Image: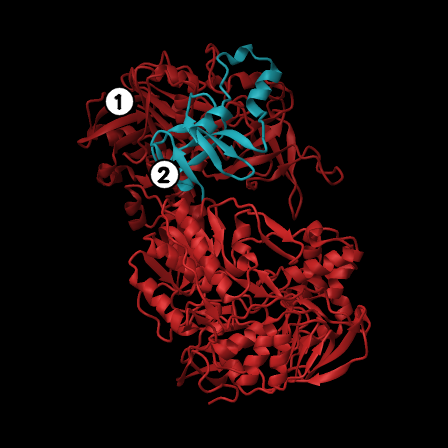
Chain colours: A cyan, B red
Amino acid sequence: MLLINCPYCDDTLPELEFAYAGEAHIARPADPSKLSDEEWRDFLFIRTNVKGVHAERWRHINGCGRFFNALRDTVSDQFVTTYKAGEPRPEPKTLEAAE
Amino acid sequence: MTQYRVTGRGRVDQGTPVKFSFDGKTITGCKGDTLASALLANGQHLMGRSFKYHRPRGVVTAGSEEPNALVGVTRGKGRFEPNTRATMQEVYPGLKVESQNKWPTLAFDLGAINDRLYMLFSAGFYYKTFMWPRSFWDSVYEPFIRKAAGLGKAPTEVDPDTYASRYLHCDVLVVGSGPSGLAAAMTAGRAGADVVIVDENSEMGGTLLSEPQAQIDGIPAWEWLAGAVSELDALPNVRRMTRTTAIGYYHQNMIGMVERITDHLATLPEDAPRERMWRVRAREVVLAQGAIERPLVFDGNDVPGVMMSGAAQTFLNRFGVLVGKTPAVLTSHDSAWHTAFDMAEAGAKVAAIVDTREIVDIGLQDRAKELGIPVKLGHTATATKGRLRIKGVRVNPVRAGSAGSGHWVFCDALLTCGGWTPTLHLFSHTKGALDWDADARVYLPGRKSEAVQIAGAGRGLWGIGAALDDGAKAGTDALKTLGKSASVPSYEVQKDRIGTGVFHKELPTDRSPGKAKAFVDFQNDVTAKDLRLAVREGMKSIEHVKRYTTNGMATDQGKLSNMNGLTIAADALGKEPPQVGLTTFRPPYTPTTFGAFCGYHKGAQFEVTRRTPIDSWAEENGAVYEPVALWRRAWYFPKAGEGMHKAVARECKSTRESLGIFDASTLGKIEVSGPDATEFMNRMYTNPWTKLGVGRARYGLLLGEDGFIRDDGVIGRMRDDLFHVTTTTGGAARVLNMMEDYLQTEWPDLKVWLTSTTEEWATIALNGPNARKLLAPFVEGCDMSNEAFPHMSVRECTVAGFPSRLFRISFTGELGFEINVPARHGRALWEKLWEAGKQYDICPYGTETMHVLRAEKGFIIVGQDTDGTVTPQDAGIGWAIGKMKPDFVGKRSLDRPDIVAPNRKQLVGLLTEDPKAVLVEGAQIVDDPNQPKPMKMIGHVTSSYWSETLGRSVAMAVIEGGHDKMDQTIFVPQADGAPIKAKIGTTMFYDPKGERLLVE
C-alpha cells in the first residue's frame, strides 16, 4: 500500500485515505464554445499516458477532502512529490534542490 | 519408542507421546513433532498421490516449500482444510488427517492408471488432446477434466473460525530467524531500534535447529540459540513472532504477515482468532530467509523415500528421526555429505555417497572412509527401484558427459542435493532486480527499490559463521539509515559446515531419455522431457514454457522446480538462463487462507448496510428489502399470501386511487450555499437557475463534460444563496465529488459551500388524490392551496410540529408531497401520518411500486433508462437545457459530431401487441425477426412493467432513431417461442396532460 503526502494536511498517510482523479494540469477551457471539435476532443479524451513521471490528481477523500496534484513514477509506482492544486508542476531541478 | 526415533536426538519431547490419526489409523508421535516427522518416525514415507498421474509420493522437504506431502486436516466441525503441508502441521492429541488424491486407498489407487497413459498427458495435453470431436466436450472431456482437476477436497461447510487483522509499525522488520536473522535482530535491538523478528516455524533458529554440532563463540549452537532468544525477549523494543509467515512485500516497506494462532492446539481457546493478518510498515526490512535445496533430476526421482538431504538432516537433528536405516546419498554439493555423516553417527548404515563431481574436498572423503561409507565420485543416477518406497538406485560412472554401465545401490532412502537456491521471493515482490551470477550460477539480489537488506544464504553466502556476520552487518546497515550507529559484532564459529557444489540440468543417463520420468515439478507432475518438448514445440520464453507445461504453477509456486526448469529449458534453447528469463514471484509466499485475507470483513461486516430512520417501521410491517447502493430499501410490503406481483399491483392501485406513503430518505441531498451559489448551479446543471424564485423547485439535469447524463433530481431554492439539491440514491457521493472537483480546481474563485445532508433529513413522500387532505391538518406556516403552493414548490414550515422542508413534487403523476424533517423525527412523523391516513386507506409502498408508477408517467431513472451514453436529447428531455446559458458542464459536447449525428439510440415508449406480454428488461430489439442470424439489433428494453392502472404492460426502450419511428412496429426475439411484437410510441402512458397533479 502506497503512502501519500497530502500537501494540505502536511501529513503522509495510507493510500486508503485517497482517491485517484486522473491526469493533472488539464484546465477546463474558459470558453468551450470557441474550441474546434478537434480541440474539444483532445480536452475530453486525449491523455499523455506516460511511462515515467506522471502528473496526476488525487483527492484526500477520506480526510480533508481536498484535491491536489502529484508526480508519480508509473514504472516504480513511487510518488516523487505532491503539491497543491493551482501550483505549477515542479521542475526536475526544483525537486533535486529540495532533496 | 517408534522404530525410526533416535533416543537422545532432536528437540521434540520424547517423553510425551502424542496420538493422532492418519487415514483412520492411530499413529504415535512426540510433542514437538510435525505431522511429517511423526509419520517418518513410524517409517511412513508415503503421504500422498500426485496431481496428474496419481503416483505415490513421500515427503521431500522439512519445511514450507514441501510439494508432495499435502494432506487434509480436520479440526472439528466446519474446520476441514485441504492441502495442508505435513511438514508445517504440528501434531496434537486427537488431530485427524487424511491423505489426498487417492481412491480407494493411498497404497492402492485406481487413478494411477493415468501414470500408464503418460503419453496422453505430456506438456500441453489440455491444448492438444481435447480438440475434437466437438461433441465430446460436454459428455467426455469436461467431466473428465473436472474430476481430474483440483488438489484435495474443498471444504463444504461454513468456516466457524474468526480471523483478525492488525497493523504494526516498527523500525526494523527481520524476516527469518536463522543465524543471519538473529544476528540482525540482536544488533538492531541492542541499539534501541523497534525490532520485529518473524519466523514461519514453531520455534526460532532456522539452520541452527538442524546443526547442533556448531559452536558459536565457544558455546554449543542450541545453548547459544537459547541465549539469543532470551536476550531478544528481554529487550522491551523487540517483538518476536513465531508461526508467522511474511507472505508479501508491498510498496514502501509494507509487509503482509499471517500468524497462525490455533492450528497447533488440541483445545481451541475461547475467543481466539484462528489466524491474524499483520500489515507491517517497517522503516527498514532485513530479509534473512536462507536458501532452498534443489532436487536432482533423474528417472524415478519421485519415489517415496527420495528426499532432500537437508530435510533428512533436519528430521534427524531437530526431530530425532532417521528417515532410513540404510540411506544412500546422491549429491552435487558438499552439504549432503554432512547429512550422511550425521546419519551414520546416529546408527544408520549409509549405503553410499554418490557425488556427480569428480573432485570433492579430501576432508569429506577421509571422514566417509572413517565411517565406512562407500563413496562414488563422478557418478550419475539413472533409475530407482520400488514403487511405494525406494529400494535402490541405479548409479553409473560418467565419462566425458556420457553414462557408463550402471549397477544398483540398495537403500531405504535416497537423500539428494542439487545445490541451494537463495530464497528471494519477497525481494522479488518489491521489483528488486535479480542479477545472474555466472560463476555461482544462481540469481542474487541486485538493484533495490525499497529500504531492504538481504543477509546470509539469501545472497549466496554459506555457513553459519558467514550468516551470523552478514546478519550483524545487515542490522548495522539498517541502523545507519535510521540514524543510529552500532559496532558490528563478529562471531567465531567452530565445526561450521562450509561447502560448495555445482548445479545440473537433468542428470546424464544411459537409457532412452524419452522414457525417463525425471520429475522437475513434483506437485504438477512436470518432467524434464515435458520441458524439452515445450521448447521443441516453439516455446521460447520461460513464461511460455511455464504455462505450457505448468511447471512452477502448483501451490508450492515452484520453490523446488523453478530453477531446474529454467536450467533445462535454457539448455534446450542453447542459451544461458538469464537470456531465457525468470518467472515472476508473486505474493503470497506460501498458500494463505481466504479467512486471513478477509479478516473481519465477512457476514454482516462484509460491507456496511445503510438504513433509513424509517427502516425499522418497514421491518416491523413485513417489508421485503432490496439493496440500492449500500442502502437496504423496502421493495414491497406483501400482505398475507401475496407475492411480489400481487403486492405491487395493490400498492399501485391504492396510491393512484387514494393515498400511498413512501420512504424516500435515501435520496441524495446536497446543500449548495454561498454568495455564488446561483452561478455555481448555472455552471454545473443544464437548467437555468437565475430566475428560479425562492420557494420554487425545478427538475435538475447533470451532464458529464462529454455531454452524457450523469444524474438528476429536483432542486429547491430555499433562499437567494441556498439550494436544496437532491440526487439519485446511488449517485449522491459521485455528484458531491464532481461538484467539489469543479469548485476546488476549476472555479476556486466562487464563494460556495457544499454540504452533504443526505443523512440529516428523513424524507417521506405522500402521493395520491388524498395526499393534501391527509397532510394539510399537520402543516403550520404554509398555505396548502393549489394557488399558494403550486406544483414544483418548496416551503419551510412545520409538519406535526417538526421543522420541515416541504416540497410539492411528484414522481408518480399523482398529487404529491415530499416532507423532509430532521432524521431523528422521521419515524415519529411517519407513524402520525400512518395513523391519520387510515381514514384514506393509506398504503405503504416500496421501490418496485415507485418504479412502476414513474414508468407509467415516462419519468426516467438515471442508470436504468440511461447508461452513460445517453444525451438529454436522446432521453427526450432536451427541454431541461438552458438554451440561453453561455456554458455549463457538458454543453460544448452537445454539438460534437457524434452527438448530433442521425440514428442515435433514443428513448421511446413500447406497447406490446399482446397487452399481457411483459418484456424482459435488457431484451434486444430488431426490425425484422425473419432476417438471418446474427440479426441487426437496433436497441434494447430499459424498463418494463405490468401496469395495474392501465391493465396492460408498458415498457421503455432505447432504439436507433426512435423519435422518428413513432407508431412503427418492432420485434423482441425470445429464447423460446415467437418474437414479441410491439409498437413504438410516447413514454407518457398515463395522464399525458398532467391533470391529476392538480386535484383540489
Residue nearest the observer in this picture, A37 or B301: B301
Residue nearest the observer in this picture, B953 or B238: B238
* B45, above or below B520, in the image: below
Residue bearing the label numbered 1: B795
Res B57 quadrant in image: bottom right
Foreground mark, 2 or 1, reads: 1
Measured in 3D between alpha carbons, the distance from the residue under mark 2 to the one under mark 1, in whole angstroms, is 27 Å
Residue bearing the label numbered 2: B654
Res B716 quadrant in image: top left
Left-right relation of B272 to A93: left
Where's the C terminus of chain A, which quadrant?
top left
Where residue B280 sits in the image (x, y, percent)? Answer: 40, 51
Left-right relation of B420 to B174: right
Q: Secondary structure at mark 2?
A: helix
* B963, above or below B327, in the image: above
- The reply to whether callout 2 and callout 1 are in contact (CB within 8 Å) is no
Mark 2 is on which residue type?
A: Ser
Q: Is residue B112 visible?
A: yes
Residue nearest the observer in this picture, B938 or A39: A39
Mark 1 crowd level (few <14, some 14–19, many ≥20, 10 Å Cα): many
Where residue B200 sits in the image (x, y, percent)? Answer: 45, 64
Subunit of label 1: B
